[in-house]
Image: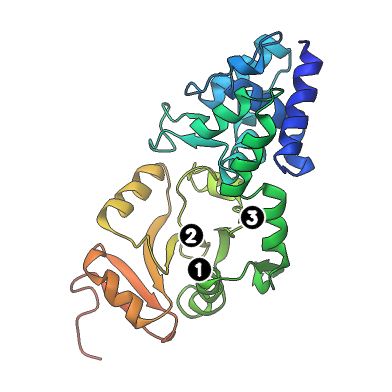
Amino acid sequence: MTKNNNLEQASCLLEAMMVPERQRNQMCCLVLLALADLRPGTKWSCAQNNWKRIHDIITFVDKHYGVKYAENSRETIRKQAMHHFRNAAFIEDNGMATNSPNYRYRLTDEMLELVRSYGKRQWNSNRKAFLELHQGLMELYDTKRKFTKTPVVINGASFSFSPGKHNMLQKAIIEEFAPRFAPGVECLYVGDTIEKDLVFDEARLSQLGVEMTIHDKLPDVMLYSPDKNWLYFVEAVTSVGPMTPARVKQIQEMTESSHAEHIYVTAFLDLKTYKKFADQLAWDTEVWIAEMPDHMIHLNGDRFLGPR
């Protein structure tokens, strides 16, 4: 089995798994081969699913396939391959903190069994069984794109969110919360169900001493006020993820080099949802509720105590 045969077969395997053309390019095929530990000449039936860092994948591809990727291309590999492979249930991570040097990926057990059967009699039945449980990416993404998009203006430019309560709340944060309580801010990050980094100003964040990457567990929305040098970390909560003490500590650890002042906000669509999470919220954080947009709840002691 030659290098080219490996790449061609990896591309054919991904195509059969309903992976869009962009996610079966050379990089994605090489990532699959590296995760399966398939060197040139190794049979698909010998595939493995050992834990690998992206650094390990880059080293493997260089050593066995002669394709060099710079270390600073790790983010590209995450965005172009890992993110989509995870959506398709091809891979899993080891659950460690995303900024940990021990953060690793591997093929899921289901995917390993599927890969090992490639080219064998049971391949087609295994493939169909996998796709019955996990939508193919082409079908998944096409289905999501058919939904009516929600327009939103971010930093003066027009974007659109996929439908859903979470994105409704993110739209309200940008268009209702920000003008009232954070006038003049820039949106440095906001994601979407399909396009995780709809807005991600990595260069601006780096200037502010924030070295977060799209792979970190980013807050739902990050805003920055140049006039006040304030960074707003906003969690949009419809079912999970408020600003708990542990979450605040996690963000502080990920942004310890930042020279901006930090503001932590939990946003809710309505008072009913807020009440579900009220006992989990960290002190010295803020609460904004979209159904009463002109008011905030300040969990910060006596800072606002005094006559009106």
How far apart in space, not on screen, are marks 2 and 1 (Cα)?
9 Å
Query: How many other residues sit within 10 Å of disc 3, few (<14), some (14-19) or many (≥20)?
Result: few
Q: Nearer the viewer, residue 12 or 251?
A: 12
How far apart in space, not on screen, are marks 1 and 3 (Cα)?
14 Å
Residue receiving disc 2: 220
Q: Quadrant of the N terminus?
A: top right
Q: Which amino acid, by three-letter code, is at mark 2?
A: Asp
First along the sequence among labels 2 and 1:
1
Q: Residue 166's mark?
A: 1
User: In this rendering, does residue 283 appear at all?
Assistant: no
- Residue 95 location (% of width, % of height): 39, 37
- Residue 114 location (% of width, % of height): 60, 30
Q: Which amino acid, by three-letter code, is at mark 1?
A: His
Q: Quadrant of the C terminus?
A: bottom left
Q: Which tag is nearer the camera, tag 3 or tag 2?
A: 3
* Quarter assignment of residue 16: top right
